[in-house]
Image (cartoon, rainbow, N blue to C red):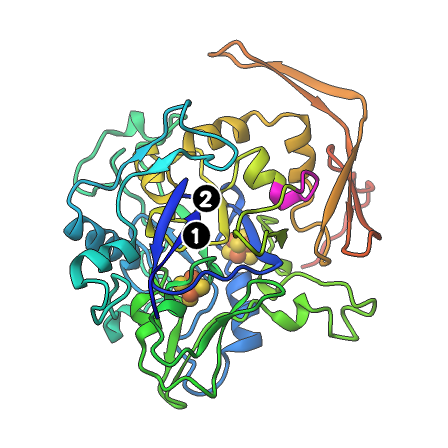
């Protein structure tokens, strides 16, 4: 397959891609609010008990939640991939994020470093045997899906071995002792590395929703996708000798289950709907099928969070696959570490999240409010219920009890929430359950 030039809006520039670019009408997208995750793993088990409970799938966790900075499944997947970029382009992974560079089509500025595709082109040549920089994890790296759970790092740089002292341990804006949970699944990338690397053309991106699937009939288990995917989300199954990956619960997206989607309206995936911490929202954004650019859709909650409020950021955008999973970064973790993981939009995202404006606060209420996919929201204004002044910055913050309403694909109202959460007072009756 020939190399093509494609526009990657997350990088703010054109990029070489070792496959033709083809864009769906709608793109599967999700936003995770890291600040709210409690690592209960309900999402992980909802996925496992639905799709990967059979023989040969024992080590497969299409959805996993790992503890950063040390945890990873497979172990050290991100550091190993970052290291590959550094080896091919030492010190070059930088962004030009000056305000005059940023714009609607370049919300994070311009990435001046190399992507995993460009790195492979430099290292192996245009017709080389590798089209993506990658590596095949060792068997033991897949063995522990939640290794280093709740293990904290002790420096602001995220490097172990230096202790800053207890008094500095829990002071915002950044904790000196820190960890956070990273929720992961296949990002159903716009420029999938797995797809570009497959010599059998067994991987395809669905034109209707951008979901990336492996054709189980065509796959011969070469594991080129496992090697190429920087997020390590395709997994090899030894019992069938083919690779498998997250299928975005597509029967649910299609609204084909007569029991849970009797109206035929799309509903969210299993991992999203099971989320106890209410950190997840999943849906679709509209895409221009000729250029791959997102079509403005101001009142789509996902479009709003990512492109208007800019509180949700892509995971390792520098890899170049234009992943469609977005994260509201954890406000207490060191900024250099977060910028490496989510790009230069981190500071703006955290600033907006810690003191959300009226619209953002209302839209945040929609997380996990309904099983149906929300295509549009509307806000009805309510009274001011609270105000405060930040003790350090002196900035005033006001809270309004607005009502946010969510609509499904067919324009039906599916959720109505107020910003103020209801409070329940138990009756004065004393039970004893011993
Ligand atoms: S996350 Fe990996 S497996 Fe999923 S689409 Fe992107 S490159 Fe392919
Ligand atoms: S279910 Fe939600 S809160 Fe629990 S681990 Fe998964 S993402 Fe985090």
Q: Which residues are magenta?
A: 297-303
Label 1: which secondary element: loop
Q: Is residue 300 magenta?
A: yes
Residue 153 vertical position relative to residue 200 in the rendered view, above or below = above
- The mark that comes first in sequence, 1 or 2, is 2
User: Do the CB atoms of the residues marked 1 and 2 lie less than 8 Å apart?
Assistant: yes
Left or right: where does residue 171 sit relative to residue 119?
Answer: right
Q: Residue at x 46, y 68 (%)?
A: 62
- Left or right of 256? Residue 240 is left
Give the secondary structure at mark 2.
loop
Q: Nearer the viewer, residue 173 or 284?
A: 284
Q: Which mark is residue 322?
A: 1
Instruction: Find disc 2 in the rendering and name its residue.
Output: 9
Where is residue 391 drawn, in percent x and y?
50, 12
Residue at (41, 84) in percent of width and height: 219
List the single residue furthest toward the bottom.
239
**Closer to the eye: label 1 or 2:** 2
Q: Is residue 86 magenta?
A: no
Label 1 – label 2 distance at C-alpha: 8 Å
Q: Residue at x 37, y 63 (%)?
A: 193
Local crowd size for mark 1, using a 10 Å CA cut-off: few (<14), some (14–19), many (≥20): many
Count residues near mark 2 (Cα–Cα under 10 Å), then give few for <14, some for 14-19, many for 20+: many
429 left or right, relative to 42: right
Going 66% across and 43% down the picture, which residue do you hit?
Answer: 301
């Amino acid at each position: 397959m020939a190399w093509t030039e494609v526009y990657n809006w997350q990088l703010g520039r054109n990029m070489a891609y070792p496959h033709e670019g083809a864009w769906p009408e709608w793109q599967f997208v999700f936003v995770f609010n890291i600040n709210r995750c409690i690592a209960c793993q309900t999402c992980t088990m909802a996925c496992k008990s639905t799709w990967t409970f059979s023989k040969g799938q024992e080590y497969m966790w299409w959805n996993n939640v790992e503890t950063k900075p040390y945890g990873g499944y497979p172990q050290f997947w991100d550091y190993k991939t970052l290291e590959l970029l550094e080896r091919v382009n030492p010190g070059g992974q930088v962004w030009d994020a000056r305000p005059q560079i940023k714009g609607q089509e370049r919300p994070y500025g311009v990435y001046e470093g190399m992507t995993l595709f460009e790195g492979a082109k430099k290292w192996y040549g245009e017709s080389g045997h590798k089209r993506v920089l990658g590596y095949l994890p060792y068997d033991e790296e897949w063995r522990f899906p939640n290794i280093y759970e709740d293990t904290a790092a002790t420096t602001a740089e995220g490097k172990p071995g230096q202790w800053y002292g207890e008094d500095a341990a829990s002071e915002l804006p950044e904790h000196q002792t820190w960890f956070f949970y990273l929720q992961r699944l296949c990002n159903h990338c716009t420029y999938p590395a797995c797809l570009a690397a497959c010599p059998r053309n067994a991987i395809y991106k669905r034109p209707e929703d951008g979901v990336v699937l492996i054709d189980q009939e065509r796959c011969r288990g070469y594991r080129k996708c496992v090697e190429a995917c920087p997020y390590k989300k395709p997994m090899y199954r030894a019992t069938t000798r083919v690779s498998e990956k997250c299928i975005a619960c597509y029967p649910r997206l299609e609204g084909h289950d007569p029991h849970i989607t009797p109206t035929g309206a799309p509903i969210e995936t299993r991992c999203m709907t099971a989320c106890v911490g209410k950190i997840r929202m999943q849906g679709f954004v509209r895409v221009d099928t000729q250029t791959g650019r997102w079509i403005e859709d101001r009142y789509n909650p996902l479009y709003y969070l990512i492109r208007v409020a800019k509180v949700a950021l892509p995971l390792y955008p520098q890899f170049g696959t234009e992943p469609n999973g977005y994260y509201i970064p954890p406000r207490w973790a060191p900024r250099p570490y977060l910028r490496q993981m989510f790009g230069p939009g981190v500071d703006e995202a955290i600033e907006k999240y810690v003191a959300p404006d009226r619209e953002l606060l209302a839209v945040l209420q929609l997380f996990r409010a309904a099983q149906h996919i929300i295509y549009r929201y509307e806000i009805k204004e309510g009274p001011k219920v609270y105000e405060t002044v930040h003790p350090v910055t002196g900035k005033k913050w006001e809270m309004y009890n607005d009502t946010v309403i969510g609509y499904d694909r067919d324009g039906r109202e599916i959720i109505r929430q107020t910003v103020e959460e209801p409070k329940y007072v138990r009756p004065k009756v004393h039970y004893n359950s011993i």
